[in-house]
Amino acid sequence: MAFDNGNGVQNTIPAMVKTSKERPDYVEMDIRMTKDHQFVVMHDGNLKSLAGLNRSVASMTLRQLTKVTVTENGYQAKIPSFNHYLNTAIKHHQKLLIEIKTGSADTPDLSERFYRQFGQRILTNHEQVHTLSYKVMDKLKREHPQLFVSYIMPYNLTFPRTRANAYTMESTTLNDSFVDQANREHKKVYAWDIDDVNSLDQMMFMGANGVITNNLGLIQQEIKDNTDHPSYANLLLTFMNDLSLETQTQ
């Protein structure tokens, strides 16, 4: 699940197409609801960082937003509608992990609008969804149980009892007991953001089902190195050595 850092403007179609050539399992991206209850591909709720425009996504229509140019890493691109982005991903045989971002201006029927517009394409092409919103996750799973939805958890405080298919967790508090509990309940665990080999090795050792990275090439090579050779013992040894060094320095 990836975006390769620096290869374009985040959450834009040219960057997704370029990343898809590296064959990640999924491209993780973000969507937000517009003023006219449509969806655009955008991480931030405000356009200031990428477009230099101090306006919120929720205060603008889809037509207005898709005319806006965003700039990052020396690249420029237009903000895409999610409809266009999804169709392009399908055309390039690239599966998506779709983060549904929410805000105070969203209408209560966000989940229904999302599924009505995109549900069938998402199911047909085996896309996945995740969200920080318990309400959105629960409503999508309750009304559309066949949809794959992961619940994003910034911290590992306690193991939740939810309808989610998976949990997406920030890696620093993820531990093997959480992964073991998820396995017992037949739920997947995705770790974010994993951008170096040591973090990846720890997540693989714990048994995480997937990692979200901004450093796709490096992570792909490390996964290949760990799975193409009988190196599980070496992975375990590396992890235990790192753990030992951490203990000695405390």
Image: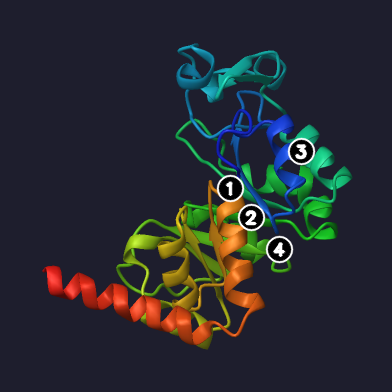
- Residue visible at 71% across and 63% down in the picture: 147
Q: Earlier in the sequence, mark 2 or mark 3?
A: 3
On residue 17, which mark appears?
Answer: 3
| Disc with the residue nearer the chain's start (4 vs 3) | 3
Contact flag, marks 2 and 1 (Cβ < 8 Å):
yes
Query: What is the secondary structure assignment of the residue under circle 1?
Result: strand
* 168 relative to 86 in the view: left or right: left
> What is the CA distance from the residue labelled 2 to the residue labelled 3?
19 Å
- What's the CA distance linking mark 1 and mark 3? 18 Å
Residue hosting label 4: 147
Front position in the image: 82 or 94:
94
Q: Which residue is mark 1?
A: 99
- Please rate how many residues cluster around mark 2, counting C-alpha atoms within 10 Å: few if below 14, some from 14 to 19, many from 20: many
171 or 98: which is nearer to us?
171
Residue 138 shows in this picture: no
Could you say which is closer to the camera, residue 198 or residue 147? 198
Q: How is the image coloured?
A: rainbow
Q: Amino acid at mark 4?
A: Leu
Residue 73 coordinates in the image, percent (x, y): 55, 25
Kind of residue at badge 1: Glu
Mark closer to the chain start, 1 or 3: 3
- Residue placed under numbered mark 2 in the picture: 129
Q: Are marks 4 and 2 in contact (CB under 8 Å)?
A: yes
How much space separates mark 4 and mark 1, taking CA atoms? 14 Å
Q: Residue at x 62, y 55 (%)?
A: 1
Sooner in the amino-acid sequence: mark 4 or mark 2: 2
Position of residue 180 in the picture relative to residue 70 (left or right): left
Task: Residue lying at the far left in this picture: please name it.
Answer: 250
Proximity of marks 4 and 3: CB atoms separated by less than 8 Å: no
Q: Amino acid at mark 2?
A: Val
